[in-house]
Amino acid sequence: MAEIGVDRWVEESGDRQEQYSGWTAPARRILDKIRPGWRLALFVILAALYPLMVGQAGVRIGITVLLLGMLALGLNIVVGWAGMLDLGYVAFYGFGAYFYAIVASDQLPAHWPTWIAVPTIVIATALLGALLSLPSRRLVGDYLAIMTLFFAQVFVEVVRNFSRLPGVSEDFDLTGGPNGITGVEPWTLFGFQFNTFNRNFYLLLALLGLLIVGLHNIDNSRTGRAWRALREDTLAAEHMTTPVNRLKMLAFAVGAALAGLSGIIFASVQVGVFPNNFLLVFLITIYAALILGGTGSIPGAVVGAIAVAFTPEILRNPGAAGWLFYGGLAVLLVVTFKRWAVGVSVLVGLVTFGYLVRQSALGVWDDSILGVANDTFMARLVDGWVLILGEHQDVVSNYAFVLAVIGVLGVIVTKGWWKVVVFIPTIYLAILVWENKLALQPSVTRQLLFGGVLMVMMAVRPQGLLGTRRVEIS
C-alpha cells in the first residue's frame, strides 16, 4: 500500500525504466501498448495469410512451428509456471502420437472416429501425467529431472521393442517396433477431412489460438497465481495453505494433455509415427524454444518456437547464413565493447590484421594457394583481406578453429585493452574458418550456427526475448 502523499506513478518510475531497458526495449514498449486480444488477433491474421504466400514446403515448416508452439506452451505450464524441471515431457507427446496411430490405422481393427479418439487420448495422457507427478511429492530439482528423464527413455525403448501383448498371437504388432506405424488416418470432423497440409495448418492455428486464450485466463486465475507461488518458494507457498501436491499434479496433467494433443495432430499430419521422432534431441528443441522466448511467458513460448523452427531453415541458404553469421559477430562486438570508439578501433584493427596475415602468407607461399570466394555479398566484401585458400584448406581451417576457441576463452578472461588485442585475431580466425570451411558445409554449419545464435541470445538477454528478468532479494 502506497504511503500517504506519495505519488505511485512517480514511485514506480524506476521499475518502468528497468522494464524497458536493453536492446529489445523499443519492441516491448510498442507491444505493451497493444491489448493482448488485439495482439492475438494480429498474430492469427498474419499466420492465416502465410500459406497463401509460400509453397507446400513452407506450409510444412509452418505446421512444425505451430506444433512446437503448442508443445512449448504445455511445457511452460510445468517449467515456467509451476517451476518443476520435467525432462520426460517428450514422452507424453509420443504417447499421444502412438495412441492415435494405434487406434486410427490398420494396427488394430478399431479405427476410432476422431471425435472419440481425440478426447479419449487427451484424457489418458493427462492421467499419465498425473501418475508421473506422484514422485514429485518427495522429489524436487535435479532428482525430479532424473526421474522424468528416465521415464522418457523408457518410453522410447518400450515403443521400439514392445511389439505385442503377452499371450497374443505373434502376428499381432502393437507399436511396430523400430519400423513404427504407418498409414495413420487424418482427422475427420463433421464429414470434413484434414488430409492436406493447408487444412492441418489452419486446424493447428485455430487450436493454438484457443489454447493461448485458455492459458491467458488460467495465468490470471487463482490457479495461475498459485503455480507461480509454487515456483518461487514451495515451502512458503505450503505455509500459506497452498495445496502444493495437488497443484503439482494439476500442472503435470495439464502439460501432458497439451503434449498428447500435439502428438495426435503430429501423427495425423505425418501419417505415421516412429521411435526416433521422440528422442532426447527433440526435447532439447522444445526447451530451447521456451527458454529463448522467455520462460513463464505465453507470447514468449510462441515467439521462441517461431525462432527455433525457422532459423535452421533460413540457414539452408548460404547467403542468409552468411548474413546471420556476420550479424552475430556485429552483435558480439557491440556487447563486448559498448563504446562506439572502441568498436571502430576494433574494426580498423581487424581489417589491418587481415591484410598483414594475407601478405605474410603470400610471402611464404605463391598465389596458387588462394581460392575463390563464395558467391555471396559478405564473402566478396572480406575477400580482399581474409585469407581464402584453395590448397591446404581443411588443414588450415581446422587449426584456425582450435585457435579461435582458445581466443574466445581469452576474450572472456581478459580486460581492458588486452581484451581488444585478443578479440581482433579471434574474430579474424572465426571469419577464416567460416569462409574456408563452414560456409561450404551447410549441413554441419546449420547446427553450429544455430547453437551460436542461441548462445549469443542468452548472453545478451538471459531471461529470453519476452521473459521478465527475475530480481533476487538479498
Image: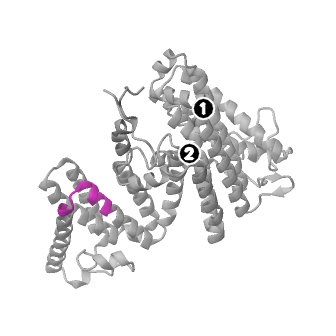
Q: In which quarter of the image is residue 271?
A: bottom right
Q: Mark 2 points at which residue?
A: 72
Q: Where is residue 139 in the image (x, y as percent from the top left)?
A: 50, 23
Q: How crowded is mark 1: few (under 14 residues within 10 Å), some or many (20 or more)?
A: few
Inspect this view and state whether residue 157 appears. no
Residue at figure coordinates x 50%, y 26% from the top left: 230
Amino acid at pointer 2: Ala
Residue 394 percent coordinates (x, y):
32, 69
- Which residue in the rendered view is the most extreme toward the front? 5
Residue 221, which numbered label?
1
For the N terminus, the image quarter is: top left
User: Is residue 418 placed above or below 213 in the rendered structure?
Assistant: below
**What is the x, y in percent for residue 97?**
69, 46
* Quarter occupied by residue 248: top right
Per the model, the C-alpha gap separating discs 2 and 1 is 20 Å
Name the residue type under label 1: Ser
